[in-house]
Image: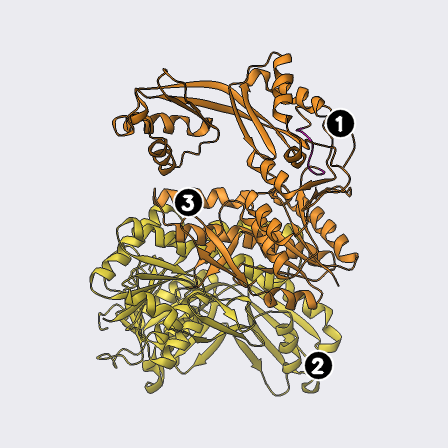
Chain colours: A orange, B yellow
Amino acid sequence: MANIVIKLDEQTLTSPDKIENVAKKIIEEKKRGLNVVVVVPSMQLIDEQLNQYAYSLSNNPSNREMDVIHSTNTQVASALLSIAINQQGFKAISLTGWQAGIETVASKRAVLIDFIQSEYITEHLKKDKITIIAGGQGKSEDNNITLLGDGGPETSAVAIAIAIDAERVDIYTNSIGLFTADPTVVKKARKLKQITYDEMLELSHLGSKVVHPRAVELAKKYNLPLNVCSSTENVPGTLIKGEIEMERNLIVRGVAYETDIIRLTVGYESYEQASLANLFTTLAEHRINVDIIVQAVIDGVKPTVSFSIEKEVFAEAIKVLETNKSSLGFAFADFEVGLSKVSIVGSGMVSNPGVAARMFDRLRKENIEVKMVSTSEIKVSVVVPQDDMVRAANALHDEFNLVEELA
Amino acid sequence: MANIVIKLDEQTLTSPDKIENVAKKIIEEKKRGLNVVVVVPSMQLIDEQLNQYAYSLSNNPSNREMDVIHSTNTQVASALLSIAINQQGFKAISLTGWQAGIETVASKRAVLIDFIQSEYITEHLKKDKITIIAGGQGKSEDNNITLLGDGGPETSAVAIAIAIDAERVDIYTNSIGLFTADPTVVKKARKLKQITYDEMLELSHLGSKVVHPRAVELAKKYNLPLNVCSSTENVPGTLIKGEIEMERNLIVRGVAYETDIIRLTVGYESYEQASLANLFTTLAEHRINVDIIVQAVIDGVKPTVSFSIEKEVFAEAIKVLETNKSSLGFAFADFEVGLSKVSIVGSGMVSNPGVAARMFDRLRKENIEVKMVSTSEIKVSVVVPQDDMVRAANALHDEFNLVEELA
């Protein structure tokens, strides 16, 4: 009997009705004769309340104890889902991270899954139970309850799928799959049948929050297919996998965007003073995530460096620059708000030079000013005025023929 | 360094302020140079909400999953207390049942503590951490999260104290100890300095909810002192232990009462039909707890049996009697409401015949009608009209000189 893993999204756990509905959908998979593992994310409902309580006791509660508290969230969610499945006459069991044999190890920046003792999961699958696992958690070697952090539930789902040799992971979402662009912005956007891991990685770094890059990277490493699909409707989703057939001619697979980008510019008196390493290390130490970096190196002109950040960290970034002005050695700092980032993504770009040029050309024809540019092998991003964002996304969607049903 | 165990009561966890206050009191013990283990009960705050959610999914959720859900309650409570202690500059760590090495085994009627791997607790005490353990829970041999049921947190506290060879268990309450009678009913009631396990067992079965009999029995088996004391005030509490000094002359140690008692009477046509075993087995099967049983066996009179029950199960008891009238073989059933039970408890009774007689005599002088009587070696209980309950309790408190400060 084949194994599959289903990863739920938070939207499916916000009311008893929704839990009942997703229980029915899970049971349908079971009825197809599959061994089903379900990985649940946290229930926002409970989380916020616990947070408030903890922070009313301390401004700086220990990570260890906050993990103990927040782990109960997915523990409760998985037990509730198990009860809902039982109620419909099917066998189910909920497992916490430690009960599912998920052993974690702490790295410098994150808690990682070290290994999974899969027999703790497979023993229940053999007894024909739908096995529900609290996502994003495990236990460390010294018996602490640990949380995996960002992207935890997806990462649990992928790691479990690898450990039990599952066919695929179904990633349940409130959409019917991934689209060539955000349908609320680009009217002609259409659903993708397939997408590669690398394309998905670029898309997820661009703010498509459906699958965390951490989980995509792990799936890519083990060539495990991820199926992004609806948690309510019975329609095919988007398959994320290694190689995609029959569409080499589709250079660009999707258009993505991000709003509320701010450009900061720092100017130096001389090249000697301009230490980019210093600048970005200092920002990183204050957890300010910098996205695009553009360094202007023009003879006879004093050097400047521009970089984009998200609105949320703007105030903190300004503070860090002001506080460290002398040690960072810059002469002035400037900023521009009201910007957006628009990106095109597609693995076809690798073998198609001139994609970026075609993008710039189209934006020029649309009279859209490009403020910053960043490129990777399968992605080109431009920063444009926020007011032009929708127009830019539609123009690029049109330019690269994304309306054609090829994949 | 000596070990002590502190068992908190639910009242100390109802607000962040209260958690901070009890954290301070715990830290005082630590400052005395003791290794401190704290056992926390559930936080009603969270529990009720989770219950509602589960029962909106199923009328009959599995015990296993309900245990998974409710165990999070004490898990959160212990982490919050740990945060509060940290905030005051002291080291603390929270442990769930499984993290504390508490292994349980299921018996026919309850989940019992099988053994405790105490090194999971002592390793933290050696590091000078105040070790906070989620009460009333553990894990079974097959890795399930289990709840101990009624009296769970106290039982955890006593079992842990035995496992780590603690000096005593401090049972924190919202009173300053145990009293010779309820001070709201008997004005002259005074606090007891000491009481024996057996006396405490009789008192706790009589409705004094401070320490569950299950925990007292375990403490008695290992001769572990329990100190019932205030969770806020710094005054000596009541010590529950095996032998009490200097007060053999105090025959009765306390007066207890219970209100809302109902007397049911069942009458039979003949002795052949009167199967008490049948009657009480049937009631037990419907979880109707019967307290005092009085069988009238008078020659020439048809046999009757009277028994007392609590108000809460009255409707159910009547239903059971009606439904099973033919199989139980009784001719009529009758009841009397508006009754109370008043008891005197004291291990001095064993060597003092005539205590019951003295009790009845005093009640007769007070013109209080005794409806039912029940006696044990160290207790005499009478059922009286509810309206006479306060008078009866005060009279008996007076009769047996409980106002005298002897213990």
Separation of marks 1 and 2 at Cα, in angstroms: 91 Å
Q: Quadrant of the C terminus of chain A?
A: top right
Of residues A308 and B58, which is closer to you in this image? A308
Q: Work out whether disc 1 and disc 2 sit on a shared chain.
A: no
Q: Position of residue B289 (x, y in %)?
A: 56, 70
Decide whether residue A4 is among the magenta residues.
no
**Which quadrant of the view contains residue B224?**
bottom left
Looking at the rendered structure, the secondary structure element under dot 1 is: loop
Q: Which residue is mark 3?
A: A53
Q: Which residue is mark 1?
A: A403
In-image side of B194 versus B149 (left or right) = left
Separation of marks 1 and 3 at Cα, in angstroms: 50 Å
Which amino acid does the dot numbered 1 rest on?
Val
Q: Which residue is mark 2?
A: B269
Residue B54 seen in render: no
Of residues B29 and A280, which is closer to you in this image? A280
Q: Are marks 1 and 3 in contact (CB under 8 Å)?
A: no
Q: Quadrant of the N terminus of chain A?
A: bottom right
Magenta region: A176-182
Looking at the rendered structure, the secondary structure element under dot 2 is: loop
